Amino acid sequence: MSTITSRLLGTAQLSVRSYEEVEIDKQANVQAIAVVILSAFAAALGTGIRDIGSTIALVAVALLSWIIWVVLTLVIGTQLLPEKDTRADFGQVLRTTGFSAAPGILRVFGLLPVVGHLIFVAATIWMLFTFVVAVRQALDYTSTARAFAVCLLGWIIHGVLFFGFVLTAI
């Protein structure tokens, strides 16, 4: 069994083996959630948020948002766009996508003068790549394009729901 550090590095490096390992390890749920929390906390720090209330709110929204995206990914990937061998459950998608947030930890460097914004954006884009690989592996896809389509469709639906909620709350 790998350490969390090797899993973080492996998933950040888009290692299929690392994603497969966390997919099957039912004990890795807490680790996956911790990665998402750490990534969200790093984003809060990297954007310059200093007060504890705003930081907690950002982490809470990030967690809720991720859980919604996991559910959407599972439904879209297994019901709307499955491949012949697609088999996945909530835990598998939760674990793989949770670890796909590993590059987001680098967003803490968003505070650096001059290059901070570039690092923040690069880490966020990197997370999109890792999310696609995580979805491809969790859903047992052979097609990265299909995994990308699931991620994109989930992102659009998630965005509509999120902004709809925000607009009704205003």
Image (cartoon, rainbow, N blue to C red):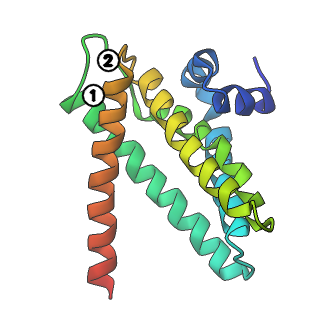
* Percent of width and height locating residue 38: 70, 53
The residue at 69%/54% (across/down) is 119
The residue at 53%/60% (across/down) is 62
Dots 2, 1 in contact, CB < 8 A: yes
Disc 2 element: loop
Q: Which amino acid does label 2 sit on?
A: Thr
* Percent of width and height locating residue 145: 33, 26
- Which residue position is annotated with label 1? 78
As measured in the structure, the alpha-carbon distance from the residue carrying label 2 to the one carrying label 1 is 6 Å
Q: In this view, does 8 lie above or below 70?
A: above
| Residue 8 found in image quarter | top right
The residue at 39%/52% (across/down) is 68
Q: Which amino acid does label 1 sit on?
A: Thr
Q: Is residue 92 visible?
A: no
- Which residue position is annotated with label 2? 86
Q: Which of 101 and 37 is in front in this view?
A: 101
* Percent of width and height locating residue 88: 38, 24
Disc 1 element: helix
Q: Which of 110 and 2 is in front in this view?
A: 110
The residue at 29%/53% (across/down) is 156
Q: Is residue 113 above or below residue 31?
A: below
| Viewport quadrant of the C terminus | bottom left
| Residue 163 found in image quarter | bottom left
Q: In this view, does 109 lie above or below 44?
A: above
Most distant residue in the front direction: 114
Compared across the picture, whether 15 is left or right of 138 comes to right
